[in-house]
Image (tube, grey):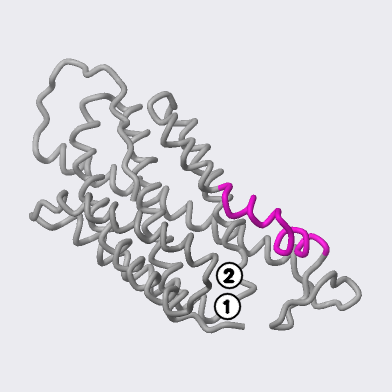
Amino acid sequence: MAQYDNNTYARPGTATRSGADVDQGLRSYMLGVYNYMSAGVALTGGVAYGMYMLTTTTDKTLAAATLKNGIMLTELGKTLYMSPIQWVLMLAPLGIVLYLGIRSHKMSASYAQGVFWLYAAAVGASISFILLKYTGMSIARTFFISAAAFAGLSAYGYTTKRDISGWGAFLVMGLIGVILASILQIFIQSSALQFALSVVGLLIFAGFTAYDTQQIKDDYYTSSGYGVEALAKSSIFGALSLYQDFLGIFMNLLSLTGDRE
């Protein structure tokens, strides 16, 4: 979803590379991007589940609060989900990703990777509430549907000969509109608006998946002239973009189709 300019290294002297070398390099680069992205998703899921285990209980003597759906919260759960601290959980990922955007030019690849892992963990903590809201079966079902949709859309962005860079401006404008409407939704709590936001959000992140994949592919040809460090850093930010796209697809699809506890 978010592309960062990682070409902060001096370009070395030009070198000739065969088409086979470029193709093999591109495949390795994209595999690295997908590996980072997948590991980020796994970390998010692990942190979310760990938070769920720490904040809920089946022992009534340990329950500090009980939700409307009957789920009992521990003292930690009550503190995290029923106090102003919940806003810290929700906004922490935004703060981290803004930091990444502002400092991207000055980060080394290893530092950017560390911040990426921190971001994925923070997202896991912030979305752990879905395990309180939706059934485990519907979360698992939505995850696999989202993964299949993401794979198809990303494959399209990678293989298409069509230049879809023009999608970027429309997708960003649509995302800004969804964010503004989501802020409004916090105050009016309209089920119709929530449904519309989920549908539009799903379409926007679907478009971003194809768009970002093509941009990441193009970034390889740009960054490869700047050295190994630039490529490594570019792959991390590419993974961040695809991670955000997958998360957007998953969360919006879950809002539309998830079975509530």
Asked if residue 59 is among those painted magenta in the image, a careful observer would answer: no
In the picture as drawn, the residue positioned furthest to the front comes out as: 188
The residue closer to the viewer here, 28 or 149, is 149
Give the alpha-carbon distance from disc 1 to disc 2, as whole Å. 6 Å
Q: In the rendered image, which quarter contains the C terminus?
A: bottom right
Q: Answer whether labels 1 and 2 touch (C-beta < 8 Å).
A: yes
Task: Indicate left or right for 170 with 141 as reference.
Answer: left
What range of the chain is rendered magenta? 75-92
Residue type for callout 2: Ile
Q: How crowded is mark 2: few (under 14 residues within 10 Å), some or many (20 or more)?
A: many
Q: Which mark is residue 237?
A: none
The structure residue drawn at horizontal position 83% and vertical position 63%, both measured from the top left corner, is 75
**Location of residue 93 in the rendering, given as x and y in whole percent from the top left corner:** 54, 48
The chief SS type of the magenta part is helix
The structure residue drawn at horizontal position 56% and vertical position 43%, both measured from the top left corner, is 118
**Location of residue 50 in the rendering, given as x and y in whole percent from the top left corner:** 67, 61
Q: Which mark is residue 134?
A: 1
The residue closer to the viewer here, 15 or 143, is 143
Quadrant of residue 179 within the rendered picture: bottom left
Asked if residue 76 is among those painted magenta in the image, a careful observer would answer: yes
In the picture as drawn, the residue positioned furthest to the right comes out as: 61
Q: How crowded is mark 1: few (under 14 residues within 10 Å), some or many (20 or more)?
A: some
The structure residue drawn at horizontal position 24% and vertical position 47%, both measured from the top left corner, is 27
The structure residue drawn at horizontal position 26% and vertical position 45%, both measured from the top left corner, is 216
Query: Which secondary structure, mark 1?
Result: loop
Residue type for callout 1: Tyr
**Location of residue 214 in the rendering, given as x and y in whole percent from the top left corner:** 20, 50
Asked if 258 appears above or below 120 in the picture, the reply is below
**Location of residue 32 in the rendering, given as x and y in whole percent from the top left corner:** 35, 45
Task: Indicate left or right for 20 with 82 as reference.
Answer: left
Which residue was labeled with disc 2? Answer: 130
